[in-house]
Amino acid sequence: MVEEKLNHADLVTATDKAAEDLIFGRIRAAFPDHAFIGEEQAAAAGGTAALGDAPTWMVDPLDGTTNFVHGFPFVCTSIALVVGRRLVVGVVFNPVLGELFVAAAGGGAFLNGAPLATSAATDLAGALMGTEVGTARDEETVDSTFGRIRALTSKMRSVRCGGSCALGLCNVAAGRLDAFYEINFGGCWDSAAGALMVSEAGGAVVDPAGGPWEVMSRRVLAAGTRQLGEAVAAVLAGCKLSSKEAGPPGPGGVPSLERQEAAAAKAE
């Protein structure tokens, strides 16, 4: 059964709901004092989600629901654990392709047991970029979304839209994409695990405006190198957001990737 959430492009299936219930049930049995933020749970609460002080599991039971409905193989389950607002564990599994991505803070990132490393690309002209068009279909947001893609396409080798934020980030961690960004995705469950994957594979994760990335911001820019990330952010800075898109996190936000911050501080 397929249902629409916000519009004809924003779908949910019985599989989404059943998978989230199963995952939450298993984790809750092992960690009864932990908190949970899930895509379908948040949708049932009107789209709201808040991160508190308790260790928190962020779960997207089926990232790439539209792909799943159409039989397109880029679908996954994404699970992350946040402790003290820091990402400590990330798991992304694509059951169709049999790819299991795992990362632990300070422990590296792996695909089916093999260590991951991001690409070394630093220049826009030779880079392959990933992004997504999202589910908003109002004219203003569609124009701003494709305005960003247009601005980057003119400067980069090419752009890919795979239909899953989590897998887009994992593909940066694996060196398949040189960079990936998305603005105004559903919530932290889309980006948390994949962002940790990139950081632990040696890449950079920042806000698309270039500042520190915050897990609750609904915005992410990941790149194999900090230089490429800065170059992409500079292009995005010249692109207009729609009135319905999430802007950069305000001052006082808590950066979410401890290893990345430590590496940046050491470089300075």
Image: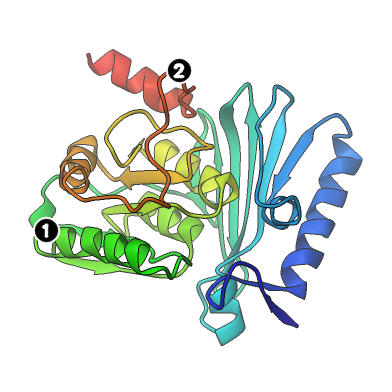
Which residue is identified by label 2? 252
Residue under the point 54% across and 43% down:
192
From the top left corner, tell me how far across and down residue 11 is, in percent. 62, 73
Q: Secondary structure at mark 2?
A: loop
Counting the numbered discs, the total is 2
Pair 1/2: label in front: 2
Query: What's the CA distance linking mark 1 and mark 2?
Result: 36 Å
Left or right, 36 with reference to 62: right
Q: Are marks 1 and 2 in contact (CB under 8 Å)?
A: no
Q: Amino acid at mark 1?
A: Gly
Which residue is identified by label 1? 126
Q: Crowding at label 2, few (<14), some or many (≥20) Cα neighbours within 10 Å?
A: few
Left or right, 156 with reference to 264: left
From the top left corner, tell me how far across and down residue 30 is, in percent. 87, 38
The quadrant of the picture occupied by the C terminus is: top left
From the top left corner, tell me how far across and down residue 159 is, in percent. 24, 67
192 or 141, which is in the foreground? 141
> Toward which corner of the image does residue 122 lie, by quadrant?
top left
184 or 25, which is in the foreground? 184
Residue under the point 16% across and 46% down:
238
Residue under the point 41% across and 68% down:
138
Placement of 130 over or under 96, stated as above or below: above
From the top left corner, tell me how far across and down residue 213 is, in percent. 41, 33
Q: Amino acid at mark 2?
A: Gly
For marks 1 and 2, the one nearer the N-term is 1
The quadrant of the picture occupied by the N terminus is: bottom right
